[in-house]
Image (tube, rainbow, N blue to C red):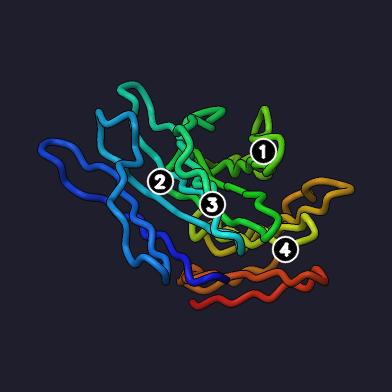
Amino acid sequence: DYGRSITVWREQNGSIVNLWANRYTTQAGWGNPVLIDELNTSDVNTHRIAMDGDGNAMVVWSQHNGTQYRLWAKRYIQGTGWQPAEDISTSYSSLNLAVACDDAGNTVVAWNYNGDVYVKRHEKTSGWDATATALFMSTTYTSASHMTLDTNDNGGAVILWVVSSSVYFSVHDPANGWSSAASLFSHSGPYTYNYVTVTMDNLDNITIGYAL
């Protein structure tokens, strides 16, 4: 809301692929690139970034630690700078993930592993949930794809993902937590859903877009 932005990219550095970020402000333009993945020993894979209206941001990425893929997060605090990276995994992570921030500075991250869908929240004042919430447990190990989510300023959130020919969802409200995952719609044709998107406004209204 104040002319600030942060871009994140992967860049080959010798034998590994690192994750970098750079910040832009209308007053100063682009700053100096910052190395995001402090592990710096293996390739960074999927990465996502989200920013709130005050210029705070959260970067999440998947990276192998020598034994397994883990999910990492690094927060940018407006006026303070980048915070240390944190391993937020509670199990193996995957290359399919999503992140969103609300304007109160809270963050929601979702990912899947072996078809199971997990979610974890970061509260601005208290930090990350101690454990991730399992929203969907696959019985077929079919990967959950096209994961997308959105938040509003009241603590609400919605997550959508695709399993085979069905779109699933779960909704969060501060009083009751996450709803049980449910199939929103499905089709019997030969194609899967692609480019699934979702938005949630401050009245908890949800809009969904998709393509086959």
Residue farthest top in this picture: 67
Tell me how many marks there are. Answer: 4
- Under circle 2, the secondary element is loop
- Under circle 3, the secondary element is loop
* Residue at mark 1 to residue at mark 3: CA–CA distance: 31 Å
**Residue 133 appears in which quarter of the rendering?**
top right
Label 4 sits on residue: 152
- Report the side of 40 relative to 47 (left or right): left
Q: Quick one: label 3, few (<14), some, or many (20+) residues within 10 Å? A: few
Of pointers 1 and 2, the one earlier in the residue sequence: 2
Label 3 sits on residue: 78
Q: Quick one: label 2, few (<14), some, or many (20+) residues within 10 Å? A: some
Q: Nearer the viewer, residue 180 or 152?
A: 152
Q: Quick one: label 4, few (<14), some, or many (20+) residues within 10 Å? A: many
Of pointers 1 and 3, the one earlier in the residue sequence: 3
Above or below, comparing residue 104 to residue 60 in the picture: below
- Which circle marks residue 134 in the picture? 1
Please state which of the two labelled residues, at mark 1 or mark 3, is closer to the viewer. Answer: 3
Is residue 142 visible from the viewing direction of this image? no
